[in-house]
Image: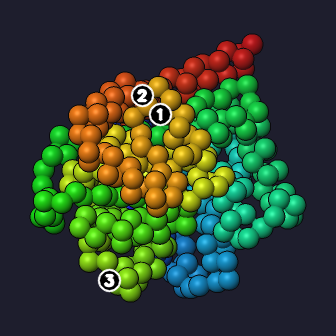
Amino acid sequence: MARWNSANKSRYYHLLNKIADAGHNVLVVQPPPRSSEETNYIDLPPESHANVELYTVAIASWLWDVRFPLDKFFKKALYTILSYFTIRRLIKKNKPDILIVYNLPQYIYTIGNNIPIVFDYADDYIAMLQHELGLSNDNLFCIISSLLLRRLINKSVLVTSVSETLNRKVVHQNKLLLSNGADFFPSNDASTTLHIDKKQPVLGYVGAFEYFIDLDMMLDAAERLPDYTFLFVGAGREFSRIKDMIFRRKLHNVILTGAVPHHQAMQFISEMDICLNLFNKGPVADAASPIKLFEYMSCAKPVIATRLAETQRLDAKIKSFYYADNIAELVAQVEYILRHPELTKENVEREVQMVKTNFTWFSLADKFIYELTRTLQERMVWKNG
């Protein structure tokens, strides 16, 4: 559903670009642009790749741009139905080896197609529906969504999950834990155009401004630490509210950049002394594998994180994260990090090594390609019996 050139560079953007780098052809179907504060619909200048072909589904602007009740879900349903025919034409014309789907409405793509399906389980979709629509477990819509999820898993030849929390929920004989990751940028140490005064520590956040991020605790910290700079990079549905709160609370030490190109976001991380990975606790957060967490680590920055299942699983071996579930813990961790520079250096060195060893997008794409190849070969042997 996300646009390829959205401000929020998704897991699919990173993985599929690396798969294309390996010489494979990638066909991407995306919705047309529309006005929205949601990060996935904030477009940045387009990028191209010789092995990536983009297909934008044609939808009449009068229908796509007008607002409806439950607009997000109506537009997803509309796009899914219309994109079905685009995908059918692409399959007939290009005869791809696999079709990768990653959301419940995309179950429709499996109907009438005999192409092998790979389902990427990237979020707790049921929990997200319950939160955004205010639904209970026994709501008919949630029951139908859970049924779609099971059927989509059953129809897939391979199921990949972004976190161990989601992977445990998958009942399938061929499943793979495929985490998020990060790249290493040679320009990470370059100064940005902000020219931030580095006399005082800079605390930063990079990512989506959405309901599952604890942006309020970050603002509370900015109020508690008025001599420190807080650099927030990104945009989303919560951006206007946060901007208004900064104005009303007179938080002059907070800088908002808005949506920026991915390489520039990585440069902004270089301005930060401490990076924040703070979530509002719940099923959506527990299932997450935050890309920004890996990007912070790849940039050798100390990370203060909420205690979440996946975050603690990743930290189990290196024991390098600093945890804060409330404002008192957050302020205490900031002060602890700044008082112990040598220990902080040791921690971030372990972070960098972990990303280099297991969580670069290149290594994750290689792992994905290997499993795809193995799955397709086994399927061919089975068919030829």
Instruction: Name the residue located 67 percent from the left edge and 22 percent from the top edge.
Output: 379
Residue 139 in percent (x, y) is at 85, 65
Residue 126 in percent (x, y) is at 72, 55
- For residue 179, side relative to residue 191 (left or right): right
Q: Is label 3 in a helix, a strand or a loop?
A: loop
Q: Which residue in the protein does label 3 denote?
A: 250
> How packed is label 1: few (under 14 Cα within 10 Å), some, or many (20 or more)?
some
What amino acid type is highlighted by mark number 2? Answer: Ile
Instruction: Name the residue located 38 percent from the left edge and 28 percent from the top edge.
Output: 354
Residue 288 in percent (x, y) is at 56, 47
Location of residue 205 with respect to 188 vertically, above or below? below
Instruction: Name the residue located 68 percent from the left edge and 65 percent from the top edge.
Output: 131
Q: Which residue in the protein does label 2 denote?
A: 318
> How packed is label 3: few (under 14 Cα within 10 Å), some, or many (20 or more)?
few
Q: Is label 2 in a helix, a strand or a loop?
A: helix
Q: Which residue in the protein does label 1 denote?
A: 315
User: First in sequence: mark 2 or mark 3?
Assistant: 3
Location of residue 326 with respect to 135 vertically, above or below? above
Q: CA distance from mark 1 to mark 3?
A: 36 Å
Q: CA distance from mark 1 to mark 2?
A: 5 Å
- For residue 313, side relative to residue 329 (left or right): right
User: First in sequence: mark 1 or mark 3?
Assistant: 3
- For the C terminus, which image quadrant? top right
Residue 226 in percent (x, y) is at 28, 70
Instruction: Name the residue located 12 percent from the left edge and 55 percent from the top edge.
Output: 191
Please report contact status of discs 1 and 3: CB closer than 8 Å, yes or no.
no
What amino acid type is highlighted by mark number 1? Answer: Asp
